[in-house]
Image (spheres, rainbow, N blue to C red):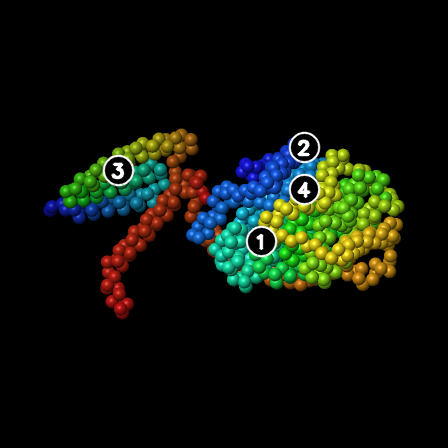
Amino acid sequence: MEITLTHYLVLSTVLFSIGLIGVMRRKNLLMLFFATEILLNSVNVALVAISHYYGDFTGQMFAFFIIAIAASEVAVGLGLLVLWFKRYNTIDLDNMTQMKG
Amino acid sequence: MEMFVYIALFAPLVGSLTAGLFGAQKKTLFTGIFASGMLFASFMASLLLLIQVLQGNTYHVEMMTWIATGDLYVPFGFVVNQVTVTMMMVVTLVSTVVHVYSIGYMDHDKAFNRFFAYLSAFVFSMMVLVMSDNLLGLFIGWEGVGVCSWLLIGFWYHKESATWAANEAFIMNRIADLAMLVGIFTLYWNMGTISYEGIFAGVANADHDMLVVAAGFLFVGAMGKSAQFPLHTWLADAMEGPTPVSALIHAATMVTAGVYLVVRMNPMYDLVPEVGIIIASLGAFVAMFAASMALVNRDMKRIIAYSTLSQLGYMFVAAGLGAYWVALFHLMAHAFFKALLFLGAGNVMHAMSDELDPFKMGGLKKAMPGTFWMMTLASIALAGLFPFAGFFSKDLILEVAFVEHHYILYTVLLLTAGLTAFYSFRLAFLIFLGEERYKLFGFHPHEAYKYMLVAMSPLLILAIIAGFLFKGTYYEMVIAMLPAGEYHVHNHLVYWIMTIGTQLFVIAAIVYAYKKYQDAKIDKKVEEGFFYQLLFNQYYIPKIYDEVFSKPYAELSKMMWKLDNTVVDATVDGIANVFYGTAKKTHTMQDGNLSSMLKWMVVGLVALLVSAAVFIGIVTNTDAIMKLLGH
């Protein structure tokens, strides 16, 4: 069976849904980061696949940008996470309610 | 010489702004001296300009363009000619005197600096009014003096009565100003210009009815500023302000602006004698009407205020009969002796701890001889005895009425001259002669500061000599602009009978006042009489205004207030309540929990995606949907 664009897009959708559910359900900050990573990469898959399908490299370039920015975002995020853990000894989301309006 | 025009105009403004900088601080003598110095500079510049004008030079400067749009061109232009320079001299001279006097008068006042800021600002506005080369500039000055008058009447704003009087003056003037604007618009609409030159060039060919309308409306504006009946009530109430203000604004300068307007617009008023006769008749009526109220009043400043009103009536008689130069001459002479009278009254008030009732004074001659002589001489000038200024200006107005064959006006004015003499000397005798009644009330009068009396002396000298010394020069000068006319009774016998008769009549009135009031006896029977009560209550006019205008207006305002509450406010509040309620119900969304916020984000994302999908669906299937709906 040949793998077509549809397969990639279905994979991307499935990954996105998993990521979205993760973002909504996870209470652990670290897990939340994983979920966002899955979200980003599902989009990457879709971008690369469509780029290949049209023979246009713009989509792949975009994917690289996303990878680079996601990396820096995770670096900053993990740094803050470690700091948070040191101070409060927990990374449970339900305890982070300082922004309550 | 253009520089002197600007100095004369802007020096008071510099003084005002400088004093204003220190307005909120406590008294600094410097502001008073600086403002007075600036006024003196303005006076000297005016004097130099007067000398130039006497040599036949006039000046017209255009400082800058103000409004230039379409056919309308209005510059900030200023004119120095025979008429304006006369006014400039009067304004700057009296203001300089009043400024110096005020340094002494306002000595103990906390708001000393603020007072000078306002007073100099007034002079600047008055100079703009006088010097402007177009009606719009005049109007700006007109409004400027109105604002300064409001500020100064309500200067002691912690007094309820002062703020009330300030508002009354401002609102009454506002009503008249509307008419004045209509007059200016009428002129612009029909003649396409509002500069004096342009209007004067065009009046000869202008439509007569239009001129009547314009002249009438402009005169209504003049009536407001000059407090003519029926807009007169504010002037007496304006006496709530500090006395130097009464002297400068409500006697010598601002209230004469109405007369000045008629004089300045003389080529127009010359063409509409029917308006002129109305002006003259109203003037004569006001002269008598105001003088009658002054007869019985028991408030020193109000008596002088009514006297001002009465003299303004005289000026309007002269202006209305076409004797513009006589009106302007009386304006000038009146400014001198009336300001002097007011400043003298200020000295008395100071001495008597702001007591105003002359029946509580008496015998002050001993305590304050300087003031006694000044006020007596000013009263003589006001009464018009030879050879004081009033004789040459006021009696001339009588002659004008006689020569122009308006014998009714003449009779009214003659009677008023008697009343004038009577009430001014009633006041003088009550204050200065007789028993020292003030001792009963525990006053310790003292003479004013020396420099205050010195400051007043130029006015005294002018009140005495202005008539016989300057009349000839003045006449030679102003006939370049105003219609000439000697207004001399040609029959010698008639002339002498008239002159001596008037003099004797006036002297008789003074003697009668002396007989009646030297011992300040109050005749109970007269006081309870109908006429006394009528006059004492100012013909009940303030009461009538209160009943007819103020109270119904207050009722209307209350109704509108209710309407405002139930309709306008309710609508606005309703809208606000909707938002407030929504926020109250939904604010729990913002619980600060990252997880739930992310959930809301997802909800938002889904909502946006769905609406985007629906929108695209509608756009791509428009035709099908239209068909379904039956089109």
Distance from the alpha carbon under mark 1 to that under mark 2: 42 Å
Callout 1–callout 2 Cβ contact below 8 Å: no
* In the displayed structure image, the side of residue B583 where residue B17 appears, left or right: right
Secondary structure beneath dot 4 equals helix
Of badges 1 and 2, the one in the foreground is 1
Instruction: Mark 4 or mark 2: name the one nearer the start of the chain.
Output: 2
Picture coordinates of residue B621 (x, y %)?
A: 24, 60
Whole-Å distance between the Cαs marked 3 and 1? 82 Å
Residue A66 circle label:
3
Q: What subunit carries mark 2?
A: B
Is residue B275 placed above or below A38 in the rendered structure? Answer: below
Q: What kind of element bears circle 3? A: helix
Under circle 2, the secondary element is: helix
**Do circles 2 and 3 both sit on a common chain?**
no
Chain to which mark 1 belongs: B
Q: Is residue B136 visible?
A: no
Which residue type carries mark 2?
Leu
Q: Residues within 10 Å of mark 4 (few under 14, many from 20)?
A: many
Which one is closest to the eye, mark 4 or mark 3? 4
Task: Look at label 1 and name its amino acid.
Answer: Met
Residue B94 has which mark?
4
Specify the quadrant of the image occupied by residue B178: bottom right
Q: CA distance from mark 4 to mark 1?
A: 24 Å
- Residue B611 point in image, percent of width and height: 31, 54
Callout 3: few (<14), some (14-19), or many (20+) C-alpha neighbours within 10 Å? some
Q: Are marks 4 and 1 in contact (CB under 8 Å)?
A: no
In the picture as drawn, the residue positioned furthest to the left comes out as: A1
Residue sitting at x 13%, y 45%: A3
Q: Which mark is residue B29?
A: 2
User: Which residue appears at 27% of the width and 54% of the height?
Assistant: B613
Sort mark 2 into few (<14), some (14-19) or many (20+) by Cα contacts within 10 Å. Answer: few
